[in-house]
Image (cartoon, rainbow, N blue to C red):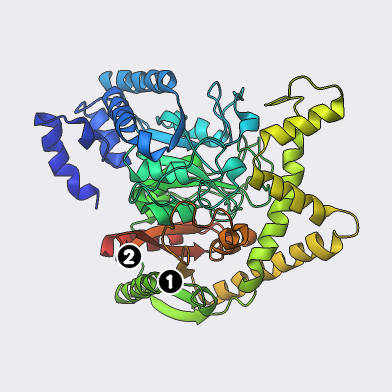
Amino acid sequence: MRSDAVSLLHFDFCLLPLPVQLTQLSIDTARSAVQERKTTALALAEAHYARIQKEDGQIGAFLTLCKERALEQADRIDRMAAEGKPLPPLGGVPIAIKDVISTRGVRTTAGSKILGNYVPPYDCTAVARMEAAGAVVLGKTNCDEFAMGSSNENSAFHPVRNPRDLNRVPGGSSGGSAAAVAADMAVVALGSDTGGSIRQPASFCGVVGFMPTYGRVSRYGLIAFASSLDHIGPLAKTVKDAAIVLRTIAGRDSMDSTSADVPVPDYVAELEKPVRGLKLGVAKEYFGDGLDDEVRHAVESAIDKFKSLGCEVLPVSLPHTPYAIPTYYLIATAEASSNLARYDGVRYGHRAPGVNSLSEMYRRSRDEGFGAEVKRRIMLGTYALSAGYYDAYYLKAQKVRSLVARDFEEAFRKVDAIVTPTSPTAAFRLGAKSNDPLAMYLADIYTVTADLAGIPGISVPCGETREKLPIGLQILGKHFDEATVLRLAQAYEQAV
Ligand code: GLN
């Protein structure tokens, strides 16, 4: 879709270097334009900042801009291009980073007041790898506090609005990253996914969102929510851009002992392989009550599209799906209650003033620093882990998690990938669910299963509702088989 615009853009570069066109490039077109000196990395960064200046007042996707760092990196790339040196794969490409991902010297808040002034002393491995590949970090994107939420309304700073309809949520928790990409304020963005936070906002904003296998991308420098479920991955305008980012950030990192030592294929080259003959599973558990009719129809016609591309569609059964939401909300809150114990006013972030004792400092710092949803989760998680309830809740949830994972193992004996809706509905209105946490949690039904099982999944745009709201198609794959997921997603993207 985007690559069709190349010839037009060449024309634009020569005759009409309008900043707005510079914000609509794919990674490859941006990089080669810089390499061939048709534009500069500086001009690309400036065009994106101009776009942010113009649009972000109403969208609210960014929390912090780091222009100095961006322009320094852009200048480095421009000098390489001027000297005729080959640019790295993301040379000069402007990107955005979710604010749960640490950036050295750049404020990183996790969307929370408790980290409102926190400036990390080191870069997250994924950010370091993106910059080493030439990417230009424009700034940090808004998110639900500590990535807890599905609508971005839990940000301690301000909500994000969906660029397609400013009265609707962009999804969450990586809502700022999804909105930034959807509104051409960044070419690609990094997000994090613990229960759907990359795929669901991608589906609400009409962009591509990819969650790799657990362990495929280092979590070093990711502010922990639930460590056994957290993943870093890309949000992008095209599947190919997502593949380029994944190729850049994937692979073993000695700083994260859970990062996997599994060879990283060339995801971009793999996109070229045909999809004909691949077997796709469809599970009735993902098409039950609560699924919006328009979403159902869009996903069913996507499945027909795969048939016409030569894929074989087979029914599969994932019988433990109905237990996934309670399982996820037990494990995620239990891990969060433990991970968030470190915010005690001593080492990082907010410390309550005028306290008389250590325990009062802990209590008041945490009370003033954390928002309502984070407190709710700390209480739920502490309860689930407490003596007397541990076996009934946490241990039980771990057992059910294994059953959910086993469902997928069984299904993947028969099929190469599984196709589902990403979310039961399109983007909802701001405020529609903010007073009903359970309704908000239940909407994660199609995304939490992949996090529990540790398998990769993508959300790719799949049409619109009558109200012109984007719909997302989810494709799930086997452990470490990101290549097949991306290949199917790209085949679909190109077919439509
Ligand atoms: N919506 C889910 C939650 O609130 C998922 C969040 C995430 O993936 N970070 O926990």
- Write the residue at 60% across / 70% down: 408
What type is the residue that disc 1 sits on?
Asp
Q: Nearer the viewer, residue 432 or 140?
A: 432
Indicate the position of residue 482 as horizontal and vertical percent values.
49, 56
Q: Position of residue 223 (x, y in %)?
A: 63, 37
* Picture layout, residue 127 above or below residue 179: above
Residue 486 in sight from this viewpoint = no
Residue contact at pointers 2 and 1, CB within 8 angstroms: yes
**Which is more toward the observer, 278 or 403?**
403
- Residue at the spot x=59%, y=75% of the render? 318
When asked about the image quadrant of residue 320, the answer is: bottom right
Task: Determine which residue is flagged by label 1.
Answer: 292
Q: Position of residue 143 (x, y in %)?
A: 52, 41
Q: Is residue 450 above or below residue 142?
A: below
Residue in view at x 53 percent, y 37 percent: 126
For label 1, the SS is loop
Say which quarter of the image contains residue 495. bottom left
> 10 Å neighbourhood of mark 1: few (<14), some, or many (≥20)?
some
